[in-house]
Image (cartoon, rainbow, N blue to C red):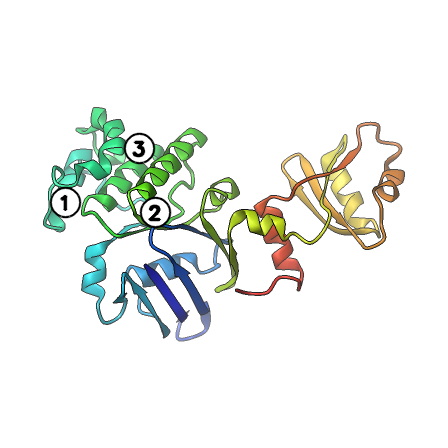
Amino acid sequence: MISINNISKTYNKGTVQALKDISLNVNEGEIVGLIGPDGAGKSTLFRILTTLLLPDTGQASVSNFDVVTQFKEIRKHVGYMPGKFSLYLDLTVEENLNFFATVFNTSIQSNYHLIKDIYQQLEPFKNRKAGKLSGGMKQKLALCCALIHKPLALFLDEPTTGVDVVSRKEFWTMLKNLQKQGLTILVSTPYMDEASLCDQVAFMQNGTILSKNKPQQFIEQYTQNLYGVNGADAYKTLLKLRAHPLTASCFAFGNNIHITLKEDSTVSDIESQFLDDESFTIQKITPTLEDCFIQLLNTNEWKPS
């Protein structure tokens, strides 16, 4: 459904490299997540695929339509939610939806089955202006507007950033239901719990795709023993572990600390340095996707796809 071959893009007359030789394929009916920090190139890639930007080099297509030469066809067949809410704040929920349906020469009634489950939550507020909606309701309205013309592929650029946990969960339930209807979804997210819900995850950094795989396969391929550490003072424990000569990597995860050890090191070697901290615990844990991403960034054991 989505094919990207050696796409590159620069800004400021070539001085800023946003994308470097990106290649990625998304199969029909898949949910693929793009994971990476701010500045990794995710939004630039979305704008190229939705024909808002031209690539400097390379080729890309959506549903076999080329993003450069057949952009008008692509715009008929894709839905796009940018990272920033971009609907008309002074129009009501119903007016926004009617407007976007009209733009695509359709009506709410024609494709109501696509948005029914989402719109039913918005219906009590259909006469409220979009600018007065909560963050979660704004995202649901934006999703309805992106779906009203029955797209083949949906592009979501960090759709749940700044939204509460309950609304995020509801939003992903909606995406899974849309996938069951055959929709292909490319989504970027900063949340690793959301990334784990994707069929495939592509890790991005500095305009490149480092690796792409199923979430569970990333975890299974984690190459080191990972340990979770707790101490009375998390920050002091973190600093002490990072200074320890046997520590290979050490990162804070909320109130916990995840560490890996250098070869031939044992847990007892670490424990012996924390005998004065009665609350100190260290135990082997299963890595998360975030652990996998950190390892991918900091070792040479992972190769780009």
Say above or below: 153 vs 270. below
Residue 255: image location, x then y, percent: 66, 34
Q: Nearer the viewer, residue 52 or 194?
A: 194
Task: Identify the residue shown where x is 76% and y is 33%.
Answer: 231
Element carrying mark 1: helix
Residue 148: image location, x then y, percent: 19, 43
* Foreground tag (2 vs 1): 1
Residue 192: image location, x then y, percent: 52, 43
Q: Quadrant of the N terminus?
A: bottom left
Residue furthest out toward the top: 124
Visible residue check, residue 11: no
In the image, which disc is placed on residue 137?
3
Disc 2 + disc 1, Cβ < 8 Å: no
The residue under label 2 is 84
Disc 2 + disc 3, Cβ < 8 Å: no
The residue under label 1 is 101
* Foreground tag (1 vs 3): 1
| 237 relative to 191 in the view: left or right | right
Q: CA distance from mark 2 to mark 3?
A: 14 Å
Task: Identify the residue shown where x is 26% and y is 70%.
Answer: 68
Q: CA distance from mark 1 to mark 3?
A: 19 Å
Say above or below: 279 vs 294. above
Visible residue check, residue 47: yes
Upstream in the sequence, badge 1 or badge 3?
1
* Foreground tag (2 vs 3): 3
Amino acid on which disc 3 is placed: Met
Upstream in the sequence, badge 2 or badge 3?
2
**Quadrant of residue 9 in the image?**
bottom left
